[in-house]
Amino acid sequence: MSRRSEPVPFAFLAEGDTFRSNVTPPPRQRGSFGEIAGRWLLGLTVVAGLVGSLLLGMPALSTPSGPPAPQSQASQGHP
């Protein structure tokens, strides 16, 4: 049995990934000093926030390594 290729109404969509345009996009403009400094400042702020939250959260995540503290008699219900 031989299959013939039939015309597909949207065959151009399948060929879209092989299409190459002869139009080159314009070159990207370099950001101004203020824009670059703002991006660096934003990045440093995010990193500092993550490091700070990690440093502040570490004591809460650690388990006590010493022997348990003795409880008072009042907490055990004795007079």
Image: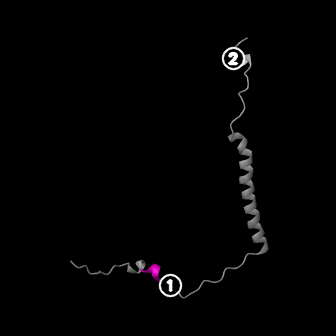
Query: For the residue marked with disc 2, what is the amino acid?
Result: Gln
Residue located beneath label 1 in the image: 20
Judging by the rendered image, the residue that carries numbered circle 2 is 76
Residue 46 location, quadrant:
bottom right
Quadrant location, the N terminus: bottom left
- 24 above or below 34? below
Please tell me which residue is depicted at 72% across the width and 41% down the height of the picture: 59
Judged left or right of residue 69, residue 25 is left
In contact (CB < 8 Å): disc 1 and disc 2: no
Between residue 39 and residue 9, name the one nearer to us: 39
At 66% from the left edge and 82% from the top edge, which residue is drawn?
27
Is the residue marked by circle 1 packed among few (<14), some (14-19), or many (20+) residues within 10 Å? few
Residue type, mark 1 in image: Arg
Start-end of magenta stretch: 15-20
SS category of the residue bearing label 2: helix
* Image x and y of residue 21, in percent: 52, 85
How far across and down, in percent of the image, does residue 79 sit? 73, 11
Residue occupying the point 73% across, 26% down: 69
